Amino acid sequence: MYHNGVQKKSLRRPTNRTRGLTKTQSAAKLPVMRQYYLWTIGCQMNAADAARVGQGLQEMGFVPTSAPRGADLVALITCVVRQSAEDKVVGRLTSLKHLKRHNSQASLVVMGCFVDDRTALQARFPYVDAFFQPSDISGLLEWVRERAPATPRDSTREIVPYPTSQPVSAFVPISYGCDHHCTYCIVRLRRGRQQSRPLPDILTEVRDWVVGRGAREVTLLGQNVDAYGQDMGAGAPDLADVLTAVHRFEGLWRIRFLTSHPGHITPKLIRTVASLPKACPHFELPVQSGDDQILRRMGRNYTVAEYHELVARIREQVPGCSIATDVIVGFPGEDEAQFQATYDLLASKRFDAVHIAKYSPRPGTPAARLPDDVSAGEKERRRALLEELQTQIAAEINATLQQRTVEVWVEERRRGKWKGRTLTNKLVFFEDGANWRGRLAKVQITWAGPWSMQGRLAEQDSASSSRE
Ligand code: SAH
Ligand code: F3S
């Protein structure tokens, strides 16, 4: 569910003030407005939070800007899943130490998994105005509302609004937090116990936040999205019920969900994904290790054999589906044979994608009390071996799509090409002069690499390629 790279938040939301204006036009015509800059790192849950914070700020009259300098509000949405992510957050915070030199009234706020003991954080970063826990969107927006002057400060600054446009895809969290006890994981400590959202709230959000804004694809999010409902008592709906209910929205074309814990995938969920045409046949199913002893010490609650059996069942019942996984190399005490077991698991299961992480001790987790005894060099060697293997496997899997025609949901234009995804979450690029953003395109694959594919437009059948 997590990615390593810093996601520069581009909030492509239309506002009444920015819609349809060129940069120069808007700079000339707009009154001075408060500007916000959002920086996001980490998982899709953070991306979902950032989009909502951005929307809330725009409703208060803020406009997005692409750099912190001069902004009236800077908000960081943070991640600490590994030390490298935490280092990036601290680096970003440090770089913002003198923010107020450029705008003495600027506010700096921090939200997300970086935030634990606020008193200690405040002492360490006295120039931060407020800290908010992960997903405390309303807390952050309330804080801004209370402080923000009714009218923006007087300024002669030119406003260069960040380009915004209608979303084509949106995230909807269906549960927050996690009830598992993976011994390496800090996320559960920062995000707390699992709290599923009532189904009517989810449906309202899909209606207003996704379909109502013209997006055709929704991704349902949870730390363990397949454990949805388990905290709500007997008779509560499960993920399959959510998928079925969301599937009824006519304006919606694709439904994704992530991340699934192998322990909660039920036969009913597999059947539901297989039978609902809009449910993407794609599973994010972290395994973490191919060795039972390591899995036990990680607190994962399944065995390698059970995981194998689950993958086989999914593949049998959802033909053509894709499966992605997460693995950690260099967990405390992982020896060569145990690493080899993970290598063998990836070689035999042949996943469509693998997110490989080097173990990183996290403060307060049970595993952090164990000696971090696999050296940095050895962790890197194991990571590189897995990556080499997976590159080969992904290239072979994608090569089977050569010359085949796939349906691509087009998200954006990048470097002169249209970029979109197949139902199975594979990236496809193609060239065309028409505007394909937010449309389904039939694309014939002409080149397939391990991470993406290129293709040419095939003959379209009008029903699926039109936006309406
Ligand atoms: N249930 C969540 C897990 C969040 S952590 C989900 O599946 O999305 C996301 C991934 O980061 C985990 O699957 C794991 O592979 C990796 N990860 C978590 N803690 C880690 C640590 N301490 N060191 C290295 N990788 C870690
Ligand atoms: Fe973390 Fe395990 Fe939950 S990885 S978020 S404790 S399922």
Image (cartoon, grey):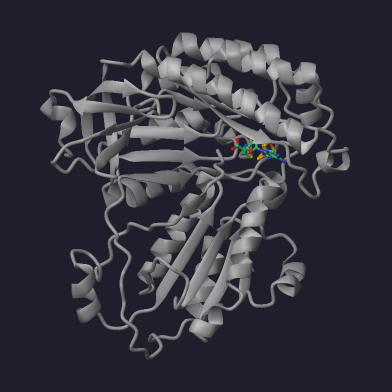
Name the residue at 59% across, 35% down: 224
Q: Position of residue 465 (x, y in %)?
A: 17, 32
Q: Quadrant of residue 409?
A: top left
Q: Residue furthest bottom?
A: 154
Name the residue at 38% across, 73% down: 62
Of 9 and 455, nearer the camera is: 455
In which quadrant is the C terminus drawn? Answer: top left
Q: Position of residue 124 (x, y in %)?
A: 74, 71
Q: Quadrant of residue 425?
A: top left
Name the residue at 81% across, 22% down: 335
Quadrant observed for ligand 2 in the rendered image = top right
Name the residue at 14% across, 26% down: 460
Residue 113 shows in this picture? no
Q: Position of residue 218 (x, y in %)?
A: 38, 40
Left or right, 315 with reference to 443? right
Position of residue 460 relative to residue 233, above or below, is above
Position of residue 323 relative to residue 43, above or below, is above
